[in-house]
Amino acid sequence: MAIVTFYEKPGCASNARQKQILTAAGHQVIAKNLLKETWSAERLRDFFGAFPVRDWFNYSAPAIKLGDVVPDRLTEQDALELMVKNPLLIRRPLMESGDRLMAGFDQDVVNQWIGLSESESISDLEKCSHSQGRHCTGHE
């Protein structure tokens, strides 16, 4: 069993399913509101590891959908500054257990990291389950 600090957007159905999978595998989940955390660029950067900047983003965020933010055009520093100002841009969830941090919920990676129950496999746990992503933008 691992203790997982799980930074989520409260009310996000995908984050709720991800937490259920972790709990079903016997892990203790400490949920925190991603949008209310005080992020620094340095702290946030640690969650993204070797991912390219484009993979740091929540593509359901209104600023991205409207074209105000184009992840492929951003430097690492610019991306982090935008995310500190607007946490809706951050790919969810952010997770921390022991000395490891990660962004997103790739079941294979999470399974290799802390282990998951085989019966809890659900496809595409990072996509918003609401029509047109309306409930996952942060405007509900």
Image (tube, rainbow, N blue to C red):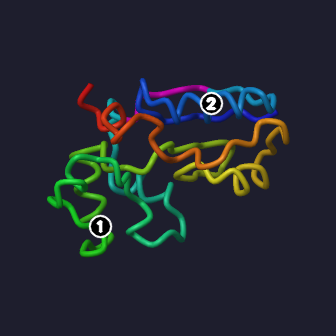
At x 83% / y 36%, what residue is drawn?
Answer: 119
The three-letter amino acid code for the residue at tag 1 is: Pro
Looking at the picture, how far across and down is residue 42, in whole percent?
A: 38, 57
Where are the magenta residues, as a range?
Answer: 30-34
Numbered tag placed on residue 8 in the rendering = none
Q: Are marks 1 and 2 in contact (CB under 8 Å)?
A: no
| Residue at x 30%, y 35% (from the top left corner) | 134
Question: Viewer-proximal residue, 81 or 89?
Answer: 89
What's the residue at 60%, 31% (across, down)?
17
Residue 114 screen position, x and y as percent: 77, 45
Find residue 60 and report its horizontal and vertical position in percent.
34, 48
The 10 Å Cα crowd at callout 1, few under 14, some 14 to 19, many 20 or more, is many
Residue 39, position in %: x, y?
34, 43
Which quadrant of the structure image shows residue 121? top right
Instruction: List the residue tagged with mark 2.
Output: 19
Q: Can you identify the residue that label 1 sits on?
A: 71
